[in-house]
Image (cartoon, helix red, strand yellow):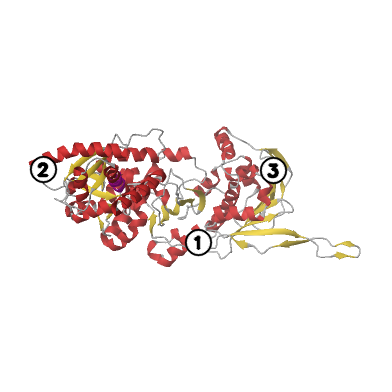
Amino acid sequence: MALQQGNISIHAQNIMPIIKRWLYSDKDIFIRELVSNGCDAITKQKMLTPGGEEEYKVTVTVDEKAGEIRFSDNGIGMTADEVEKYINQVAFSGAEEFLKNYEGDDKGGIIGHFGLGFYSAFMVADQVTIETLSGSEGAAPVRWVSEDGMAFTMTEGSRTARGTDIILHISEEEKEFADEFRVRQVLNRYCGFMNTPVYLEVVKEEAPKAEVADGEEAPTIEVKEPERINPNAALWLKAPKDCTEDEYKQFYRDVFHTYEDPLFYVHLNVDYPFNLKGILYFPKLTNDFGTREGEIKLFSGQVFVADNIKEVIPEFLMLLKGVIDCPDLPLNVSRSFLQNDGYVKKLSAYITRKVADKLTGLFNTEREKYEGYWEDIHPFVKYGCMRDNKFFEQVKDTLLYKTTGGAHVTLSEYLSKNEGKLNGKKVIYTSDPTRQSANIAQYEAEGVDVAVMDALIDLNFVSFMEYSAGVEGLSFARVDADAATFQKEVSEDEKQQHQADEKVLADLFTAATGNNDLTVQLTALKDTSMPGMLVQDEQGRRFSEMGRIYGQDFKLPERYTLVLNAENAVVKSLIKQEEGEQRDLLAAQLYDLARMSTRPLEKEEITAFLSRSNKLLEMLCK
């Protein structure tokens, strides 16, 4: 063919796509685009010659010495007219027009043999060459060369077999992309599950092994054996009934590079009203998952797009790991499009519903197994409930509360079991079973179950449940919120005496502790061995804790009530004792003991406590 020169024709309707090619967030995306183009060319050829036994593949060759990358496929190839149309006119209609002219059943997966994706090559190359030969009868090979994506030359090419080579001469500032390891990294990331075999071939110049008499031996060129990039099948494309437990676990380990098995998984497989396939895994979560993020890989027709696309995958599901394949989503779709697209919102809602279905299914049919998972998954489930009301409505009856006795109960089961033992519909919980063990023992002595809510998320979750659970009058109270459950009935005369003694004790403990904000209450408790307990208003404590967690620059005064037991011998002795050092020491010691069941003593407080303990021991020995 005669030499042809010219400039790329940019029509008004495709100016914007040309601009967008500079908006790729990662330059390495060009490798994905060019490999995808090669796969699409092969898909087209397969559609034209169904049932053929030809071995199709895309080969990426890295020549570090020459500073070049070559993308080769044995797909449909292009004629000179097709190069003119699909390259020189920067058209997107290539795949669409091909499908219009081809009536077949399998039309999925065509991204477009050439188009915008091809022009991503100019982000890293200072020269791009196309060598292509169409499979149509009588077609001649074509060579196309451009240094800037605008001006080009087109002549007869040298390719002898059907298909296309795209050769990129990498610019000086982008030399990282002429490196074997960098290219392998990108190929593994984007092309690891493509349907067409993808190979990496490396050309290296080997240094001379020795010198010869008439001078240095010339270096030799070594071509490494091509390495298959995508040997693993995309498990998510198989029907769930055709997948084994071992396959699910092995796929998880291979994709996420871990030796740990997932707890369980959800296999997504729907063809209507949209095309969506994928597998979501539940990994083991920790109680403190605030900085943890899972890894959900978004694919479009087995081509990797990105990790953790929040516009497609609900935010709370980001704690999971998995793959989602939406072949109807274009590879280079913008996030603003995703945020406003009704199709994407339906995808997101479907994914949420399937996760909820899995949880409720496990709860209803395999509750013992579900309870075994609960410690690992409850932060995720609770977070999902607070973030997505529809999810909460679906799973609210499966929410479990682990008790200090080791049982797992639902809210309705808890309320039913403790009915009549507490004032109203109340859930008693502990945020620190070890430190709050004395308070827990008091409730357990009354036959009241105590729920363990020691995860960071529980501070917000209890408030969420109070106004969202749909149970009128529901409240949550920590074991140190009040002492009403432990009080016993006394006569009116005893009440009056307690009030009189209460004033004496209030003055004593205010002076002994130096805490003017301390409220002292004297009452009769059922357990005579307990001298007193420190309680704090539930809502006030939650507000203060939230302020600390979220780094608020204000601090509310923490107001406590010291509940003293009028039935305890130590308290009775304090009431009767004369003023003096021993009485003050006993009051301060009793106060610290009550505090220690709520929170640890600070450095200076520990020193004072130990010194006071020694003094009291000395007094007892006299």
Residue at screen point 43% across, 43% down: 311
Please provide percent x and percent y for residue 211.
Answer: 86, 64
Q: What's the amino acid at mark 1?
A: Asp
Q: Check disc 3 and report its element: helix, strand or loop.
A: helix
**On the rendered structure, is 392 left or right of 63?**
left
Mark identifier at residue 57: none
Magenta part of the chain: 588-594
Please provide percent x and percent y for residue 402.
Answer: 28, 55
Dot 3 alpha-carbon crowd within 10 angstroms: few under 14, some 14 to 19, many 20 or more: few
Residue at screen point 39% across, 41% down: 549
Q: What's the amino acid at mark 2?
A: Glu
Q: Report which residue position mark 2 lands on.
A: 494
Q: 115 and 471: which one is in front?
A: 471
Q: Report which residue position mark 3 lands on.
A: 173
**Distance between the alpha carbons at the discs numbered 3 and 2:** 89 Å
Please provide percent x and percent y for residue 282.
Answer: 40, 56
Q: What's the amino acid at mark 3?
A: Glu
Q: Earlier in the sequence, mark 1 or mark 2?
A: 1
Which of the 4 quarters of the picture holds residue 408? bottom left
Q: Report which residue position mark 1 lands on.
A: 254
